[in-house]
Amino acid sequence: AAAEEQHAQAELVNFGKTLLSKLHAELEISRAVEGVPVVKLPIPEPPKDYWDLEQDVGHIEETEEFPLPPAESEVYIWVPSPSLRSLRAAYERLEAARKGGESGGADKAIVEMAKAKL
């Protein structure tokens, strides 16, 4: 906006805006990739201390009716583990960054890196 007010060359201003958009898209993809947490995958016969019960294991919410399901919905309420919530949030951010990268003109290799991480 400031460049346009100063009557800068429209061609250069547009080029700069395009380049800035591309940079923002690539930067967001890089940040999203770095933000993907490392999670434990199920393995056959895991050691006793493999799963952190507070971080890796979800649970059913204990309502007043527990162990029966809640009366109003008759469906148990699942509370995902912090690890799963973190992974879902990272996936959503990475998917949004990938879409932004494709529409923002990000380098194809960087967009492909995001696709591979998904």
Image (cartoon, rainbow, N blue to C red):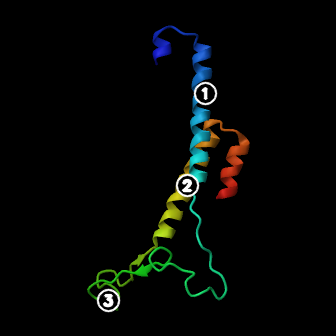
Q: Which residue is drawn at 62% across and 21% down?
A: 15
Total labels drawn: 3
- Distance from Cα at disc 3 to Cα at disc 2: 36 Å
Q: Dot 2: within a 10 Å radius of its alpha carbon, few (fewer than 14), some, or many (20 or more) residues?
A: some
Point out residue 72 in the picture as x, y percentages from the top left corner.
29, 81
User: Considering only order in the chain, which callout, 2 or 3, is on the residue closer to the N terminus?
Assistant: 2
Decide: marks 2, 1 in contact (CB < 8 A)? no
**Badge 2 is on which residue?**
35
Given the image, on which type of amino acid does mark 3 rest?
Phe
Kind of residue at disc 2:
Gly
Q: Which residue lies furthest to the top in this view?
A: 7
Residue at disc 3, secondary structure: loop
Residue on which the image places disc 1: 18
Callout 1 amino acid = Thr
Of labels 3 and 2, the one closer to you: 2
Q: Which residue: 54% across, 80% down?
A: 51
Q: Distance between the residues labelled 2 and 1?
A: 26 Å
The quadrant the C terminus occupies is bottom right
* Spatial CA span between label 3 and label 1: 56 Å
- Picture layout, residue 84 above or below residue 13: below
Mark closest to the chain's N terminus, 3 or 1:
1
- From the top left corner, tell me how far across and down residue 92 is, in percent: 53, 56
Q: Residue at x 46, y 78 (%)?
A: 58
Q: Which of 102 and 84 is in front in this view?
A: 84
Tell me if 67 is positioned left or right of 2 in this view.
left
Which mark is drawn over residue 66?
3
Residue 87, given in percent of the width and then of the height, sits at 53, 64
Q: Choose mark 2 or mark 1, whichever is in front.
A: 2
Mark 3, Cα crowd under 10 Å, few <14 / some 14-19 / many 20+, is few
Toward the bottom, the furthest residue is 67
